[in-house]
Amino acid sequence: MTVLLFGITKDIVGSSTLSVPVTKSGKLNTVGELKSYLGKTFPELNRLSSLAVAVNNNYAADDFTIKSIDEIALIPPVSGG
Protein backbone atom coordinates (compact mmCIF):
# COMPACT_ATOMS: atom_id res chain seq x y z
CA MET A 1 0.00 0.00 0.00
CA THR A 2 1.35 3.43 -0.90
CA VAL A 3 0.94 6.41 1.41
CA LEU A 4 1.34 9.97 0.12
CA LEU A 5 3.17 12.35 2.45
CA PHE A 6 2.99 16.12 2.71
CA GLY A 7 4.63 18.89 4.74
CA ILE A 8 6.40 17.79 7.90
CA THR A 9 5.43 14.13 7.39
CA LYS A 10 7.43 14.18 4.16
CA ASP A 11 10.40 15.64 6.05
CA ILE A 12 10.17 13.04 8.83
CA VAL A 13 9.99 10.07 6.47
CA GLY A 14 12.40 11.55 3.93
CA SER A 15 10.21 10.90 0.92
CA SER A 16 6.95 12.05 -0.65
CA THR A 17 5.63 8.49 -0.73
CA LEU A 18 5.94 5.50 1.55
CA SER A 19 5.32 1.88 0.71
CA VAL A 20 3.67 0.11 3.64
CA PRO A 21 3.83 -3.69 3.57
CA VAL A 22 0.47 -5.43 3.50
CA THR A 23 0.51 -8.77 5.24
CA LYS A 24 -1.67 -11.75 4.45
CA SER A 25 -3.11 -11.56 7.94
CA GLY A 26 -4.50 -8.12 7.11
CA LYS A 27 -2.60 -6.47 9.96
CA LEU A 28 -3.37 -2.97 8.69
CA ASN A 29 -7.13 -3.06 8.23
CA THR A 30 -8.02 0.37 9.57
CA VAL A 31 -6.72 3.93 9.56
CA GLY A 32 -5.99 3.57 13.29
CA GLU A 33 -3.85 0.48 12.71
CA LEU A 34 -1.98 2.30 9.93
CA LYS A 35 -1.34 5.30 12.20
CA SER A 36 -0.09 3.00 14.95
CA TYR A 37 2.27 1.22 12.52
CA LEU A 38 3.59 4.54 11.21
CA GLY A 39 4.09 5.87 14.75
CA LYS A 40 6.18 2.82 15.66
CA THR A 41 8.16 2.97 12.42
CA PHE A 42 8.66 6.76 12.51
CA PRO A 43 8.40 7.86 16.18
CA GLU A 44 8.74 11.54 15.22
CA LEU A 45 5.23 11.33 13.75
CA ASN A 46 3.92 10.85 17.30
CA ARG A 47 5.17 14.33 18.22
CA LEU A 48 2.83 16.05 15.77
CA SER A 49 -0.07 17.90 17.38
CA SER A 50 -2.44 16.22 14.93
CA LEU A 51 -2.23 13.87 12.00
CA ALA A 52 -5.20 13.38 9.71
CA VAL A 53 -5.49 10.60 7.18
CA ALA A 54 -7.33 10.92 3.89
CA VAL A 55 -8.53 7.83 2.06
CA ASN A 56 -9.53 8.36 -1.56
CA ASN A 57 -9.55 12.15 -1.06
CA ASN A 58 -11.80 12.08 2.03
CA TYR A 59 -10.78 12.47 5.65
CA ALA A 60 -11.13 9.14 7.45
CA ALA A 61 -11.66 8.28 11.12
CA ASP A 62 -9.45 5.73 12.89
CA ASP A 63 -12.05 2.97 12.51
CA PHE A 64 -12.31 3.44 8.72
CA THR A 65 -11.42 0.24 6.84
CA ILE A 66 -8.65 0.58 4.27
CA LYS A 67 -7.72 -1.59 1.31
CA SER A 68 -4.40 -1.92 -0.50
CA ILE A 69 -5.87 -0.22 -3.59
CA ASP A 70 -6.98 2.91 -1.71
CA GLU A 71 -5.18 6.22 -2.17
CA ILE A 72 -3.97 7.16 1.30
CA ALA A 73 -2.46 10.48 2.32
CA LEU A 74 -1.12 11.76 5.64
CA ILE A 75 -2.25 15.31 6.32
CA PRO A 76 -0.02 17.03 8.90
CA PRO A 77 -1.09 19.95 11.06
CA VAL A 78 -1.12 23.22 9.16
CA SER A 79 -0.61 26.77 10.25
CA GLY A 80 -1.26 29.94 8.44
CA GLY A 81 -1.81 33.54 8.84
Image: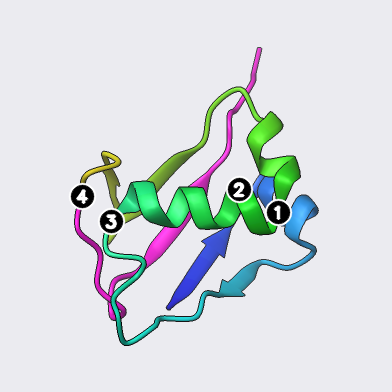
Residue kind at label 1, given as amino acid type: Phe
Q: Residues within 10 Å of mark 1 (few under 14, many from 20)?
A: few
Region in magenta: 64-81
Residue kind at label 2, given as amino acid type: Gly
Instruction: State the CA–CA distance, disc 4 to disc 3.
Output: 5 Å
Residue 64 in the image, given as x and y percentages of width and height: 20, 49
Q: Secondary structure at mark 4?
A: loop
Residue 61 in the image, given as x and y percentages of width and height: 26, 39
Residue 70 appears left or right of 7? left
Residue depicted at x 66% and y 12%: 81
Front in this rendered view, residue 13 or 35: 35
Q: Name the quadrant of the N terminus.
A: bottom left
Q: Quadrant of residue 63?
A: top left
Q: Residue furthest bottom?
A: 24
Tell me if residue 31 can be seen.
yes
Q: Residues within 10 Å of mark 4 (few under 14, many from 20)?
A: few
Which residue is under mark 1?
Answer: 42
Residue depicted at x 30% and y 57%: 55
Residue depicted at x 67% and y 42%: 45
Q: Are marks 1 and 2 in contact (CB under 8 Å)?
A: yes
Q: Earlier in the sequence, mark 4 or mark 2?
A: 2
User: Does the magenta segment cover residue 77?
Assistant: yes
Q: Residue furthest front?
A: 25
Q: Secondary structure at mark 3?
A: loop
Relative height, residue 11 to residue 4 (above, below): above
Q: Secondary structure at mark 1?
A: loop
Front tag of 4 and 2: 2
Which residue is under mark 3?
Answer: 30
Which residue is under mark 2?
Answer: 39
